[in-house]
Image: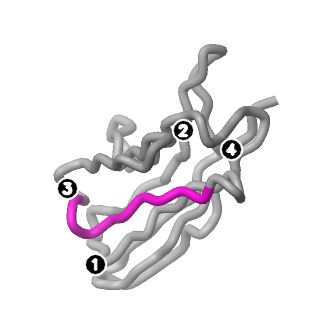
Amino acid sequence: QVQLVESGGGLVQAGGSLRLSCAASGFTFRSYVMSWYRQAPGNKRELVATIASGGTTNYADSVNGRFTISRDNAKNTVYLQMNSLKPEDTAVYYCNVKLFTGNYWGQGTQVTVSS
């Protein structure tokens, strides 16, 4: 079955960096767009970044220039490098893939940025 397992979250001071990882299994990873979303308390889940099978990336305006999404198809893993973190980046970050069989999510990893 499809599994997405995030890791790498934690507590960091403003201006710091974190690298999130999402290990995927149960589908042909290299063929699909992978995405990172985030959800802060009281807010809707929002799209942060996507990476297509060929490597094309897109970012939310709020993170463009600070975050970098990448993928390693040999390891079935997608990454989110987050630099220059701000308190407003505090959220649970989720990995996502949309397949013909459905929309799949990981369990999420908490990122907390202190001011």
Q: Secondary structure at mark 1?
A: loop
Real-space Cα separation, disc 2 to disc 1, in angstroms: 24 Å
Residue at the extreme left: 61
The percent coordinates of residue 22 (x first, y second) are: 62, 55
Q: Residues within 10 Å of mark 1 (few under 14, many from 20)?
A: some
Question: Residue at label 4?
Answer: 4
Residue sitting at x 17%, y 51%: 61
Q: Disc 1 residue type?
A: Ser
Q: Quadrant of residue 85?
A: bottom left
> Quarter holding the N terminus?
top right
> Quarter holding the C terminus?
bottom left
Q: Disc 2 residue type?
A: Asn
Q: Earlier in the sequence, mark 2 or mark 1?
A: 1
The percent coordinates of residue 102 (x first, y second) are: 61, 18
Q: Which residues, given as a range, are shown in magenta?
A: 64-72
Q: Disc 3 residue type?
A: Ser
Q: Disc 4 residue type?
A: Leu
Contact between marks 3 and 4 (CB within 8 A): the answer is: no
